[in-house]
Every structure is written in structure tokens, then in C-alpha cells.
Image (cartoon, grey):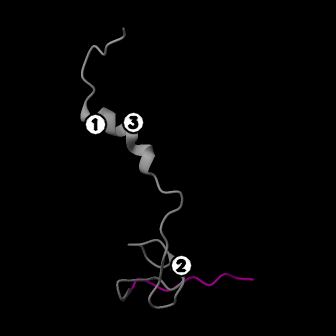
């Protein structure tokens, strides 16, 4: 019968199991200022605000 020669470390074991709890799609939240969808803990791409502060002006796209 095959027996492991060495104990598998916790880091190696957990690396192998890391894909079991992956989310299919990142959780989106809405911006409190403009209501657009954005990733949590990131600047809103449409109005450039985060945590009540403005971090620049949104760029206008030329048509």
C-alpha cells in the first residue's frame, strides 16, 4: 500500500484546496454618490469617489 513519505505541510495542503472556495463572480456594490456598479474598496470608475472623497475628475470620451 502506498504511504506518504513526509507529512504534507499546512501551506501546501491549503494551496491545493484554495480553488474550492473561489467565487464565480466578484461581488459588486453600488456607488453611494452616483449609483454605478463598482468593486468594493475601490474608486468608482464613473465619478472617481471613494469613501466620500473625490480623487480627480472622470475623463470624458470623445465621440
Q: Position of residue 13 (x, y in %)?
A: 32, 34
Residue at the right extreme of this rendering: 63
The number of discs equals 3
Asked if residue 3 is among those painted magenta in the image, a careful observer would answer no
Disc 1 to disc 2, how far (Cα)? 35 Å
Check if mark 1's residue and mark 2's residue have beta carbons within 8 Å.
no
Per the image, the residue denoted by label 3 is 16
Question: In the rendered image, is residue 17 in sight?
Answer: yes
Q: Is residue 60 left or right of residue 40?
A: right
Which residues, given as a range, are shown in magenta?
Answer: 54-63
The first of marks 2 and 3 along the sequence is: 3
Disc nearest the viewer among 2 and 3: 3
Residue positioned 31% across, 33% down in the render: 12
Category of crowding for the residue at label 2, using alpha-carbon neighbours closer than 10 angstroms: few (below 14), some (14–19), many (at least 20): some
Report the residue marked by disc 1.
11
Tell me the residue that label 2 is attached to.
37
Residue at (39%, 40%) from the top-left corner? 17
Distance Cα–Cα, label 3 vs label 1: 9 Å
Amino acid at each position: 500500500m502506498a504511504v506518504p513519505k513526509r507529512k504534507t505541510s499546512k501551506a501546501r495542503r491549503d494551496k491545493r484546496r484554495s480553488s474550492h472556495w473561489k467565487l464565480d463572480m466578484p461581488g459588486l456594490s453600488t456607488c453611494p454618490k452616483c449609483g454605478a456598479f463598482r468593486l468594493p474598496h475601490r474608486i468608482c470608475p464613473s465619478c472617481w469617489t471613494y469613501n466620500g472623497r473625490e480623487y480627480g475628475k472622470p475623463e470624458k470620451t470623445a465621440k
